[in-house]
Amino acid sequence: MSILPVPHTAVIVVAAGSGTRLDAGAPKAFVGIDGHSILRHALDGVFAAAPMQVVVVAPQGYEGDAQTELQAAAGDRVDLGRVVTGGTTRQESVAAGLAALWGDVTTVLVHDAARALTPPAVIDAVAAAVVGDAGVVPSLPVVDTLKRVADGLVTGAVDRAELAAAQTPQGFPRALLEAAYETAVAHGAEYTDDAALFAAAGHPVRLVPGSERSFKITTPADLERARLLVSPPAVPATPPSPTVVAGAPRVGIGTDVHAFGGEGNLWLAGLEWPGEPALSGHSDGDAVAHAVVDALLGAAGLGDIGEHFGTAHPEYAGAHADVFLSRTGELLAEAGFAVGNVSVQFQGNRPRFSGRRAEAEAALSAALGGAPVSVTATTTDGLGFPGRGEGIAVTAVALVIPRQDRGLSAPAE
Ligand code: CTP
Ligand code: MG
């Protein structure tokens, strides 16, 4: 058993109501918010405040349950707590609590268990504000526009600047509150809260700031609000998708076909081919370069060559592979991709490619900042338009890699 100095402050936690409006099948104080009851949460707040005597006022027949909650919340301060039986009205329940105060107590707080989430700081602030003969009420400004009404009609305006919403715990000099209670009992007067009863005895009541968390759990909607505050719904984690791997490399494919019939020398695979028939087309007709651009843009989800380099971009008319490819590399880099490698093949009878393969691969690779580019060529055994020498067909495949330093986890689309 721990030895604690006898405190001069006490809190009466009134928990003896039936909870008619909550209608949860048990006295309100014992209704669960999460794994813990309303009373347990209220007492957790009380015991997190500065040490004080704690009197729990329980519904008749629930004293044992209240004692269990008290012990759970009190920890090594259990000697500060006790349970008494409440009355049929809140005022009677408070009176029962007052009767249980220790002799050394000079300041008493009265607190609704139903204000289960009241911050301990508010409890301490109220206790500290009780000086002289004044009572203390934590309050919030009224935010709604208020109307005076009668029979379903608005009869007048109410200036909300003159109003405040009162909460608990309310604090009082013990002797004055006890005397005020005796007077109320003598007159059979019922008040809506302790501050009203105290003020009726002629004492001043001061305001201190309350808290949004001190709202009273009255209706099922209030209980839901408390539940959300106590255990906010977990933000659903993005379910791991078996089909999407963050940071996975991406492939793209590009094809291009150009007919022979252009002017000047052939440009293909980034090289000029003197004496070879030129391909026709916007720009230089380099179908190898164009297929590579489409494969890269496709892999990165950045659209296609027509979008970035088509006739709407006259600046690229007559441009060669190095211009297209280096600009494509920039577009990918801006979107957070590095080029893994590119493999491109053209089908056609001309030009004879093998003698300049290394030169072509080096030119294309250089235009892509050094990424490996391999070029292969094949004939079509005389079949189709490439076989008839009408033009060439090119297919390219590109691999691009999201750059981790960009934190890119989703594909750019
Ligand atoms: N209270 C009490 N004794 C009573 C009535 C109320 O101790 N006879 C307490 C409640 O337990 C509650 C606080 O006073 O902590 C505020 O009352 P209220 O919110 O009205 O609770 P209930 O009376 O239980 O609810 P209802 O009015 O819906 O029945
Ligand atoms: Mg009530």
Image (cartoon, rainbow, N blue to C red):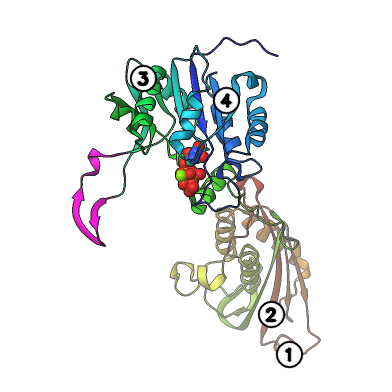
Mark pair 2, 1: CA separation: 10 Å
Say whether mark 1 is within 8 Å of ligand 1.
no
User: Badge 2, how many Cα within 10 Å: few under 14, some, many 20+?
Assistant: some
Locate the N terminus and report the quarter of the image it occupies: top right
Residue type marked 1: Gly
Closer-to-camera residue (10/178) = 178
Q: Which residue is mark 3?
A: 176
Nearer to us of marks 1 and 4 is 4
Q: Quadrant of residue 140?
A: top left
Determine the secondary structure under disc 4.
helix
184 relative to 368 in the view: left or right: left
Residue picked out by circle 2: 393
Q: Residue at x 31, y 26 (%)?
A: 206
- Of tags 2 and 3, the one toward the viewer is 3
Looking at the picture, how far across and down is residue 398, in whole percent? 70, 64
Magenta stretch, residue numbers: 145-164
Is residue 217 visible in this depiction of the protein? no
- Name the dominant secondary structure of the magenta segment: strand
Kind of residue indicated by mark 4: Phe
Disc number at residue 384? 1
Mark 2 or mark 4: whose residue is earlier in sequence: 4
Q: Earlier in the sequence, mark 4 or mark 3?
A: 4
Q: Is mark 3 within 8 Å of ligand 1?
A: no
Occupied quadrant, residue 260: bottom right
Is the C-beta separation of discs 2 and 1 under 8 Å?
A: yes
Position of 96 relative to 301 (above/below): above
For the residues carrying marks 4 and 3, which lies nearer the camera in this image?
Answer: 3
